[in-house]
Image: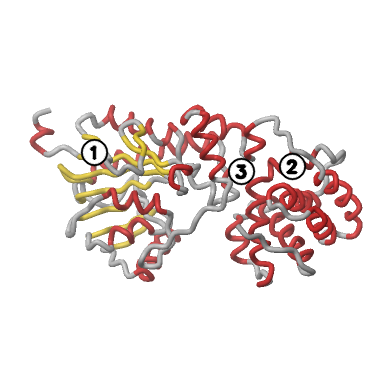
Amino acid sequence: MSRPQPDRASGSARAIAAKLLDRIESDGAFANLVLASAELPERDAGLITEMVYGVTRMRRALDHLIDGFVSDPPDLTARNLLRIGAYQLHMMDTPAYAAVSETVQAAPRRQRGFLNAVLRRVADLEPAWPTEAIRLSYPDWLVERLEQDLGADDARAGLEQMNRVAPVTTRSDGYVQDQASQWVAALVGAQPGERVLDMCAGPGGKATALAQDSMVVVAADRRRHRASLVAANASRTGAALAGVLVADGRCPPFRPGTFDRVLVDAPCSGLGVLGRRADARWRVNPGDIIELARLQAELIRVAFDLTRPGGLVVYSVCTMTGAETSEIDELVAHEHPEAVPVPISDSRWRPHGRGALILPQDHNTDGMFVVLYKTPTDSLTSNG
């Protein structure tokens, strides 16, 4: 991958990147939104973007490289400039003279001597990582959870993959959507004329994909702004949705058995999409997973009620924790023993409990879990 080369404007590029990083950390701003709203100089936009995403993603590892040479904690701007310098030195392969001098020039004059001294020592450092969580730059609990749920080798390979720049895939209708999400939509398998509900549709990627095949697709989301995104994306892609509404999936305005197929693309911890969301690894905590699993269980209960006899319920999440994948399926097995899990023959998916999983390293996509349930016909239900 080619790297933007430093030039005389690069010092200001690093100053801009440091200011954006300050906003992300101090204000809790999202990296993608901060970059989208910034007026970046065209010649340095690529360099700034890589530094902002890269430093946000790798900041724990970068702090480990820096902190051995810092006696007093620097202020946030100085720390972010140190991170920028360390990122160039050890993760961008920028020549040491350029990484150090350009970063130092971006600092306030009173801090330049300090930054110069620290970064010169960081440049000579041969990194030694005390733990995998520090090397990979994730919270300890996150690494431990995925190692427990997936096994150490698969977990670490997935986390490693999500430290790389995620590929961009564009559908034929112009919608940008990760391939794993497209594969979930394909598994819904609805036929022309069937009634399909996407219970948690925002921003509309799966709903618009389904509508391209002439299904009667209703898209719902409990958040008004996300429902608005669904409508806007449907208009942009030409997807003819039967309706877009603001509705909580736990208490939707539909009668039981209304739909032939219901997709529960549930809110989740998003641990399978950390490659795209640079700051997300620092926002999620273990308590979030507990609360999200409760919500997921509520949504799938309602989905069974809304699906006609002989219909299909599809549950998917862009995460890989056991609590949000196989344990939700165990709950379904207990509460709906009559529901028949549908085998997934697509070889891109690896079996995971009664469902299937894609890890980020499998196909350079997001991590995704899906499980399909055939609801019983009336005759099967009446026979117990």
Type of amino acid under label 3:
Trp
Quadrant of the snapshot with the N terminus: bottom right
- Residue marked by disc 2: 63
Where residue 220 sits in the image (x, y, percent)?
A: 34, 55
Q: CA distance from mark 3 to mark 1?
A: 36 Å
Quick one: 284 or 341, which is closer to the camera?
341
Which circle's residue, 1 or 2, is located before the other in the chain?
Answer: 2
Type of amino acid under label 2:
Asp
Label 3 crowd (10 A; few <14 / some 14-19 / many >=20): some
Q: Indicate whether 60 appears above or below 252.
A: above
Q: By what rule are the colours in the image chosen?
A: secondary structure
Type of amino acid under label 1:
Val
- Residue marked by disc 1: 342
Label 1 crowd (10 A; few <14 / some 14-19 / many >=20): some
Which circle's residue, 3 or 2, is located before the other in the chain?
Answer: 2
What SS does tag 3 mark? helix
Q: Are marks 3 and 2 in contact (CB under 8 Å)?
A: no
Quick one: 19 or 1, which is closer to the camera?
1
Q: Residue at x 26, y 63 (%)?
A: 242
Tell which residue pokes out farthest to the bottom in this image: 42
Where residue 232 sits in the image (x, y, percent)?
A: 40, 68
- Residue marked by disc 3: 282
Quadrant of the snapshot with the C terminus: top left
Q: CA distance from mark 1 to mark 2?
A: 47 Å
Q: Residue at x 69, y 59 (%)?
A: 20
Q: Are marks 3 and 1 in contact (CB under 8 Å)?
A: no
Q: How many marks?
A: 3
Q: Residue at x 86, y 40 (%)?
A: 72
